[in-house]
Amino acid sequence: MASANYKASPPFFFLSTQQQVAMLLLSLCLALMLPFITGTNHTTRGCIEAERDALLSFKAEITYHKVDDPISSWGNQTDDCCQWAGVRCDNDSGHVLSLNLQRMPPPEYDDDFIHFCSERCGFEWGLSGNISESLIGLRHLKYFDLSFNCFQSISIPKLLGSLENLVHLDLSYACFTGVIPDELGNLTKLRNLNLSSDEGLKVNGAEWLSGLSSLRYLSIDGANFSGVNNVMQSLNKLHYLKLVSLFDCRMNRIPESFPNLNFSYLTFMDIGWNNFHNTCIPEWLFKIPNLRHLSMTDSGLIGNIPSSIGNATSLQFLDLSSNEGISGDMPRGFGDLCNLQSLHLDGTFMGKRLEDFRDAFSGCIRQSLNVLSFQFSSLKGPLPDWLGELRNLTFLDISSNPFNSSIPASIGKLSQLQKLYLYSSALNGFIPESLGRLSSLQHLDLHDNTLNGSIPQSLGRLSSLQYLDLHDNTLNGSIPQSLGRLSSLQYLDLSDNNFNYSVITEAHLANLTSLGYLSLNHFVLNISTNWIPVFQAYEIHLSYCHIGPKFPVWLANQVNLAVLDISNTRIKDLMPDWFWNITETMAILDVSNNEIKGRLPQRLKSQDEGYDLSILLGSNSFEGSVPYFSPDVYALDLSNNQISGNIPSDLGIFDGRTPQLNYLFLSSNNLSGIIPNSICDLVGLVLLELSNNHLEGAIPNCWNNLTSLRYLILANNSLAGEVPNSLISSSQSLEVLHLSNNQLRGKFPSFLKKCTFMTTLALDHNSLSGEIPSWVGKTMTSLMILTLKENNFSGNLPLLSNLTSLHFLDISHNSFVGFIPKSYGSLMGMINVSMNGGASFPSNTQEGLIIKILVYIKGIELQFGVTLSSLKFLDLSANNLLGQIPKEIVNLVGLQNLDLSCNNLSGEIPIDIGRMQSLESLDLSRNELIGAIPPSLSTLHFLGSLNLSYNNLSGKIPYASQLTTFNDPSIYAGNLNLCGAPLSKNCTSEESPSNSHVDDQEDDDDNDNPTIWFGIGLMSGFVVGFLIVLITLLFKNEWRYAYFRFMDHMYDMMYVKIVITINKIKRALAVMS
């Protein structure tokens, strides 16, 4: 414990210039003397034999995965352990003082690899095994570092608490698990303790921390402190503590106050990513006299920031971001933080006006602040002019706020500004010319706004600019040639604006010598064929630019490309041979939707550069066979070309390597032969598109391992046999099954019962037969599109009212019988006008996939692609349905196309059919409908196609409103009792007197005819007898039920006999032919 009259040394930056120079010289001297203090490899005595044996025992229990690991050489070349790698000894005594076995990965590895054991240790990185008890023999050990190794299966050894001379202990990210031992609290000389982990460690109590009386630096990031409530109280007892990092420790509580605050030397505290839910920021934090760095990001803090924050005059860095509960006014005390350089308030003060924070930024903070970040706070505009008064800002990020404001010209006063981020902030108006005065600016990101006007010429003066992102705005006009002077520019994105094919010339790119990323679309590239770029880019995106008709020869110079997108660029040329050579470095290649010709190479080469490897050559005129490709390819699109031959039999076989292919498009080519079983070796397949080819044979029954398959599209081929039941392995992932227009036979596939996520099922134009199982309407509840057209299905129509998203149903041209279920009037997907039953429709909008289905509308067979997702369609035509059209059908107010033609429907057209206001096509022809045409039919204002021909309709045609647009009388043909326009038959005729007299005379003659009287008597008797039977049936329930059962039986018997007779005739004709 320090004495009461101990006086702390002043912070370095408060010293005079002479004192600072003296301190630096002293530090340099100490650095030069350090080897003599801690020992070096060049000892005069050599190591102690007992300590050498202890190290060898330690080595014996360690597993090292690399033969060149430094520990592997221990004891091989010399017995002097002081010469061993990672070992340092005292020059005089020979005792081991330092053991440094850190295995820090090289800088090219990402943070996940460095900090997460599951990433790093999977590659057999570093040391593992056990920690030997022999380490207790290293009594003089001061420095011990095992960081970034892989001791995944063991806890931190308690024996480390016995190494009483330890000054430095670093076990960070060494993948230890279990509870941190309390015995570490015995290390009273310890100054630096780092136990940070990726969540494998647990802390049961914090009392042991108070025993580390000499501790200066403490870092235990990622350990689990949940339920431990005395962490800060224990740390408050460590008088010399300078740094505390307890980031992401799941701490639940921070004390509101301290009776005696003891953090006299504390300069750094990071307690972010903890669970202080519904806790206000405690005021004692701002009483720590020397605190320079405070981070409490994403810790569930609420309430006002204390006004006493103005007392924390030593603060240089403050991060309170991602605490959405922080509210109220921003205290004026911020203005007194004269040393504050970096302020992060992202996701705080939600919904406030940035303009109202003027007072908080009005003091000396205006001169000190270098970094201001205020993202994702739903801040409202306008952007205030006082931002331009923060003259020393080097970094300003207030992006992702709905300012709905223009950019103030005062931003141009920030002469020190290096990085400006205002993206996704609902900014409008022009880009101010004053931004051209930001001579130090390196990054400018204004994307995803509604900025308009042209790009200012003044941006060409930003000689330090490295990053310029203006994409996704409404900018227009021509591109200033001054941008071509930005020789430091590395990243340029002008895509998704309204430049409307503005011209880009060589002058725009003339001096962009540092350019690595270029993204333009909807431009015209007016570049000569012999132009040689001055840059070497790693990504070029030029989709929808006018580059063609010639292939861009200047690409031959770009030998470092990882990504190239020249899709939809009007190229109509032969692919040059040199192009396939530069693709060897590419991870993403997209030349789709052009008219490029040429023969594909036998092997498509590519390189994994951290992207999902994609080769997209679709919709061109490439010839040849399906090429071989790397097992690392993620997506391959060769669709809509002129590729011929068979699908390679070894398509999914890569010499033991697991293929990564997720998306394979080979549709609309000239492929023939069978689908090889090897395609099922592509176990990661999400999408397989082989439609519109000449494939034959059976669909292979090998899908057992394709558990991620979501889209299977084999339509428009000559595939035969049954739908394989092994697809049941994909039942929990399958969303689209499109097998239309093949020669498939058998029953309705039984595995579909488990396809609860399927949205599209297209089995039309095949030879499938049998009844539709009742479970279709119970388990396939995600269905949006169901088409079974032109098969041999029979039985009653399936009940589908549970399919609330179903908006497209085509089961026409089958042999269904019975009545139309009333429940079809409650299909929510056809009732909702503006959405598909509330569900999303992924199958036509993701992964570049377009489902195409043939639909018969308005007398024409059309192919629907993207718009299929919004089409409301019901077609039950060409079956053997009978009975009346259920009146409930008029509830389908969102339905656009209704076809019930070519059935045996009877009764009248529903009188309220006018409620179906979305109808565009209605076909009720070739039925046995009777009665008048409902007048409400004329109110269907979107109706563009109508066919009521060949029924028994009668009366006057309601020729008004929308029906006046139908002048073709053939739509009413075969209805002999209809009259009125557009038919030539009139509903009324004027009778002349002469005709009446002749008729009267004929009536008198008829009265004298005995045959007439006989007929009248016969008819009267028939009517009386019929009425007696009818009245009896009306009042006698048992007779009525028996009568109708008899009639149903007779109908079914006659129907079966007729069908059997017809089938016999068909078979006889087939045999004869």
Image (cartoon, rainbow, N blue to C red):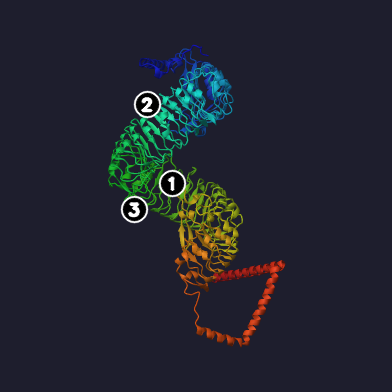
User: Residue 629 bears which disc, if any?
Assistant: 1
Q: Which residue is disc 2 drawn over? A: 367
What element does badge 2 sit on?
helix
Left or right side of 399 for 824? right
Residue 928 position, x and y percent, is 56, 69
Q: Earlier in the sequence, mark 2 or mark 3?
A: 2
Amino acid type of the residue tagged 3 in the rendering? Lys
Q: Is residue 844 magenta?
A: no
Using a 10 Å C-alpha cutoff, classify the residue at mark 3 as few (fewer than 14 neighbours), some (14 to 19) or many (20 or more). some
Q: Amino acid at mark 2?
A: Gln
Kindly state the secondary structure of the residue where label 1 is placed. strand
Segment tinted magenta in the rendering: 364-369
Residue named by callout 3: 572
Left of 906 or right of it: where is 553?
left
Label 3 near label 2: C-beta < 8 Å? Answer: no
Q: Which one is in front, 281 or 757?
A: 281
Residue 486 makes an appearance in the image: yes
